[in-house]
């Protein structure tokens, strides 16, 4: 069996943890499996390198930042190789250039284009445990790039896809994907399985287990992902195309507080007005989520929508500058809201789900401001202060259906 | 003009020094010159990385050591690039892979095979200041190697040779090559020029200014080397094939304390005995320097020779194990000696030089134990305690001839 494992920076932060990870790697290697391991930079290394760079230049170029930051992963893989060799096992470290991890040319936020698997395969044939630098790549100029947030997860999935690995294990500090944030919902349970689509919805809804890019890549190439803890031996959660067991009605409840509501009141009811509003925002890269349009009085309409809360200031400025084009009577803003969502692949074929959700919120005396639905997701906008009780109420409402 | 500059690790140890070096670089760049800069890892970085590695594995493999150590230079060049960009000048950092610095495959002590100048030339055409990682290369497997002691000097000279640079400046913490160690000889003077051959003799005799490999490479490709200080603006010393001014009689006095004398007394005067002795030592990689053979009594001879003092224990053991083959009556060892030498390209055509050296030592009441001469060098073995006074006496003897 060929297994790709990815460990984050905190998992290899010091000697003890390096050897802890080495043992996790050897568990599979000793069983005769081929093992490829993707590592991030140790602990605070990346932050220290950023500080070092900013001391020299407060606005360093992205190319040079990538040049300095990628030394962190190179140190990690060399150290892990030394640890495995010290335990008596053959290992070899490879950086992005040695693997040939080709990316686009956008420094600090490059996209993987392709991986040449030749070198990794050669080292696996030699029975080496192969340690690969996460997060980094090379562009067509032979320059070093980085993949941006969640980059090491993406590296691991891409290698698993290229090598046709039997599984790709992402080790984190939680032991899997839960039906809700366990810090908020006491009864949250760990899922054994979840589909890519559900995981994507949960990730974009604020469940910070896996980065969306890695899940998208896994979905595209059909890589079975396993999310598990580097600290315990628990089985973790498998993310795949189709879950073997009967489709779960609801796989999770997620909350997102990075949201604000904007309402344009009294827009003239003429064709193109709504289009104008959203095209202005799109031009400025403001990501609009839930949209609600209602009929006002005197031949006008009201349009409400949500934007990320950290984009609210920009949104205000943009709308202010374009008030005449939008031709609204006034614009209202509300940054004390949050979005609570349920995600489930079985939802599409079961019309009762929304009713259960709304009833749970009603019973908990929580007011719904906006509603948005997709095939596998229902989101509601509520007052931010109600977030935790809403998540608990909904989770309770579905407790027999997870 | 195309100038290659090399700065050591202490020259870029912190922000202040990074900017000091940046200013030195810009002096030449602002005059319209093309500038390529070779850097070592900052300050103690290499030692810290070695400690980090040894904590994980007391005997790390050389391949993995090279993998971790080379991150130090990569950080240096990125930071220097950021500093130059912050001052408003175009700069780009390149590592060994990007330059294509091809070496042999011997990890931790690789030899440069060739450099592809294409990328550096491209960046120079774009008017970039090009910052190149010293000390490192890639082998034919695309793996990272290091060049061993003095590696960054070698990198600089090799690049200068490949690019046909007008000069290659090696910045150190001294402001040039002196006629003797200024800490020992008060009147030592800085040389404006010195030939490669003289420099090679001085370097191997213990003047720790330039590493031999870099001087050999400079000689091979006719690269004009300049040794100068990163702290002062003094002109430094030019190392080249032929010095423009009349050949100096003596260019320097050097002392080497890493020497011990071995005497094999009463060897049977038969053919092959001396050969046997030295072939045994050669087989064990013991570097024999001055050799003196004298006729003993009763058809025997005595052979004295010097070895590096740090090889004396090995030498003792080897000779003890092979006593019967050598057939000496006894072997004597003396580790309280030192070697003092004068070097000068003009020496060959001036037979009076040796006499001046011996007279100076006689006047200072210093006993000569062995003598060795070459075309451009005369070495004497003396008691170690006399080293400094010998260097001073000889320097004084030649003071009008430097």
Image (cartoon, coloured by chain):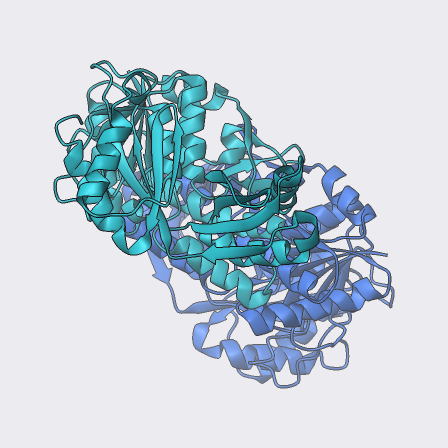
Chain colours: A blue, B cyan
**In the rendered image, the vertical position of residue B313 relative to residue B32, given as above or below:** below
Position above or below: A86 against B115: below
* Point 50% across, 65% down: residue: A43
- Quadrant of the image occupied by residue A347: bottom right
Q: Which residue corresponds to the image point at 59% horizontal and 84% vertical from the top-left? A: A363
Q: What x and y, as percent, mark residue B301?
A: 55, 43
Q: Nearer the viewer, residue B38 or A151?
A: B38
Residue ranking furthest to the front: B298
Residue A202 drawn at (x, y percent): 63, 63
| One can see residue B54 in this view | yes
Vertical arrangement, residue A337 with respect to residue B193, above or below: below
Quarter location, residue A203: bottom right
| Image quadrant where one finds the N terminus of chain B | top left
Q: Is residue A292 visible?
A: no
| Quadrant housing the C terminus of chain B | top left
Q: Nearer the viewer, residue A80 or B397?
A: B397
Name which residue lies at 37% across and 32% down: B201
- Total residue callouts: 0
Image position of A36 (left or right of B179):
right
Q: Nearer the viewer, residue B320 or B273?
A: B273
Q: Is residue A281 left or right of residue B82?
A: right
For residue B45, side relative to residue B118 (left or right): left
The residue lying at 50 percent from left, 50 percent from top is: B263
Percent position (x, y) of residue A45?
45, 60
Q: Is residue A261 above or below residue B397?
A: below
Give coordinates of residue B46: x percent, y percent. Answer: 43, 53
């Amino acid at each position: 069996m060929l297994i790709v494992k990815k460990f984050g920076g905190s998992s290899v932060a010091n000697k003890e943890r390096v050897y802890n990870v080495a043992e996790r790697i050897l568990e599979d290697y000793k069983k005769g499996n081929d093992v490829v391991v993707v590592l991030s930079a140790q602990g605070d290394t990346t932050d220290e390198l950023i500080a070092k760079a900013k001391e020299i230049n407060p606005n360093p170029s992205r190319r040079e930042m990538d040049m300095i930051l990628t030394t962190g992963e190179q140190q990690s893989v060399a150290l892990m190789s030394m640890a495995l060799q010290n335990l008596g096992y053959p290992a070899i470290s490879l950086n992005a250039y040695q693997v040939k991890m080709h990316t686009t040319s956008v420094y600090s936020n490059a996209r993987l284009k392709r991986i040449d698997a030749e070198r990794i395969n050669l080292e696996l044939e030699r029975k080496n445990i192969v340690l690969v630098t996460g997060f980094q790549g090379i562009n067509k100029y032979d320059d070093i790039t980085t993949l941006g947030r969640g980059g090491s997860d993406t590296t691991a999935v891409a290698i698993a896809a290229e090598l046709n690995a039997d599984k790709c294990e992402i080790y984190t500090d939680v032991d899997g994907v839960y039906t809700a944030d366990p810090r908020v919902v006491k009864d949250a349970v760990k899922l054994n399985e979840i589909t890519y689509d559900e995981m994507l919805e949960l990730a974009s809804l604020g469940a910070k287990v896996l980065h969306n890019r890695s899940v998208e890549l896994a979905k595209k190439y059909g890589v079975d992902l396993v999310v598990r803890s580097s600290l315990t031996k628990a089985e973790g959660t498998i993310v795949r195309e189709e879950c073997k067991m009967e489709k779960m009605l609801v796989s999770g409840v997620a909350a997102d507080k990075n949201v604000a509501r904007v309402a344009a009141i009294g827009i003239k009811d003429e064709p193109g007005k709504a289009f104008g509003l959203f095209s202005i925002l799109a031009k400025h890269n403001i990501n609009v989520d839930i949209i609600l349009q209602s009929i006002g009085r005197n031949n006008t309409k009201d349009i409400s929508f949500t934007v990320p809360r950290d984009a609210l200031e920009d949104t205000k400025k943009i709308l202010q500058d374009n008030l005449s084009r939008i031709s609204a009577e006034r614009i209202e803003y509300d940054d004390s809201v949050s979005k609570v969502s349920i995600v489930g692949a079985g939802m599409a074929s079961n019309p009762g789900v929304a009713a259960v959700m709304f009833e749970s919120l009603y019973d908990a005396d929580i007011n719904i401001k906006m509603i948005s639905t997709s095939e596998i997701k229902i989101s509601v906008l509520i007052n931010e202060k109600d977030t935790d009780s809403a998540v608990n109420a909904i989770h309770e409402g579905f407790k027999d259906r997870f």
